[in-house]
């Protein structure tokens, strides 16, 4: 388990869920991961629910924006990447061929953010921290422990994010499929990039949550109304599985050795 009070620019720093039924989602994830709920006001008639582990922030759950529901966007987990300036990051992403869906804007006093779709089609968010740095705990049971991009062009994605965030990328040997590992400028592990599977699936960032036992957690997710999309599989350094929650959002599980 790693405790964080700040994040290196270019590091994944936060994950939140936009869902059609926040109350049901909070019940599901609290039962699955042991999260405690801290509901916080986020504007008129809006709540942003901080999900806590040992009294520290791990992730968040919120109602899906109306425009997303109207467009038929499914509930989804969002991956946030820390930056020094959200405005500069958004503009640089545009120069590199990305589509900007929300120019940089303030989230009350917490920070400044922007919503970007990379040139291959995956969405991510940039986060310029002010009062809120990001998750206070990572890399452990019930905590965000990995972020993985499914891309139709692994090499092009690696080049885009390296140009945007200064990531260092290198092939991970011994995999049946191409897999690129990502490190931040200071050399810390920061996720991976792999081909889209199945090939007709949309490009996306997948959030992994740590667990002690992937098989047991997958069974519990099924009991709570979730759906196993990928059964627990051994990847050498641990086990992974992929789950769809009762509202339709997809996330992954990892059981193995966690970084600090």
Image: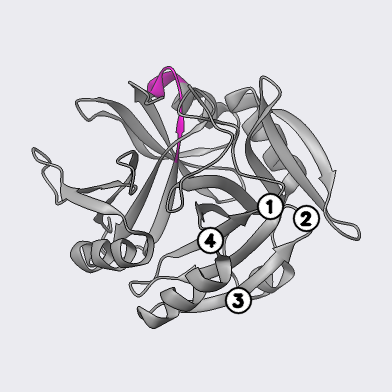
Is residue 237 inside the magenta stretch?
no
Residue occupying the point 43% across, 17% down: 212
Relative placement, left or right, of 250 versus 74 is left
Foreground tag (4 vs 1): 1
- The first of marks 3 and 4 along the sequence is 3
Quick one: 153 or 56, which is closer to the camera?
Answer: 56
Is there a contact, CB below 8 Å, between mark 1 and mark 3?
no
Residue 37 lies, in percent from the top left, at 75, 32
Outermost right residue: 44
Residue pointed to by mark 3: 103
Foreground tag (1 vs 3): 1
Relative placement, left or right, of 241 versus 178 is right
For numbered disc 3, what is the local secondary structure?
strand
Residue pointed to by mark 2: 109
From this view, report whether residue 238 is shown above or below residue 194: above
- The first of marks 2 and 3 along the sequence is 3
Range shown magenta? 208-216
For numbered disc 2, what is the local secondary structure?
loop
Quick one: 55 or 178, which is closer to the camera?
Answer: 55
């Amino acid at each position: 388990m790693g405790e964080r009070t700040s994040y290196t620019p270019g590091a994944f720093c936060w994950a939140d869920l936009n869902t059609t039924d926040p109350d049901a989602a909070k019940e599901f994830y609290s039962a699955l991961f042991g999260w405690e709920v801290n509901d916080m006001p986020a504007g008129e008639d809006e709540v942003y629910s901080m999900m806590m582990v040992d009294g520290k922030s791990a992730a968040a759950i919120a109602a899906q924006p109306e425009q997303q529901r109207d467009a038929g966007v499914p509930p989804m987990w969002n991956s946030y990447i820390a930056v020094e300036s959200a405005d500069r990051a958004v503009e640089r992403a545009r120069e590199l061929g990305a589509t900007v869906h929300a120019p940089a804007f303030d989230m009350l006093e917490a920070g400044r953010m922007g919503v970007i779709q990379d040139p291959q089609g995956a969405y991510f968010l940039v986060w310029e921290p002010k009062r809120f740095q990001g998750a206070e705990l990572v890399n452990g049971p019930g905590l965000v422990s990995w972020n993985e991009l499914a891309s139709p062009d692994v090499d092009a994605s690696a080049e885009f994010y390296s140009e945007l965030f200064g990531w260092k990328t290198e092939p991970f040997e011994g995999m049946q499929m191409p897999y690129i590992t990502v490190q931040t400028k200071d050399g810390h592990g920061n996720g991976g990039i792999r081909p889209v599977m199945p090939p007709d699936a949309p490009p996306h960032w997948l959030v992994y949550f740590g667990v002690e036992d992937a098989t047991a957690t997958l069974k519990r997710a099924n009991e709570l109304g979730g759906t196993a999309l990928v059964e627990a599989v051994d990847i050498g350094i641990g086990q992974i599985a992929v789950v769809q929650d009762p509202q339709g959002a997809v996330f992954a599980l990892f059981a193995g050795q966690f970084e600090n």
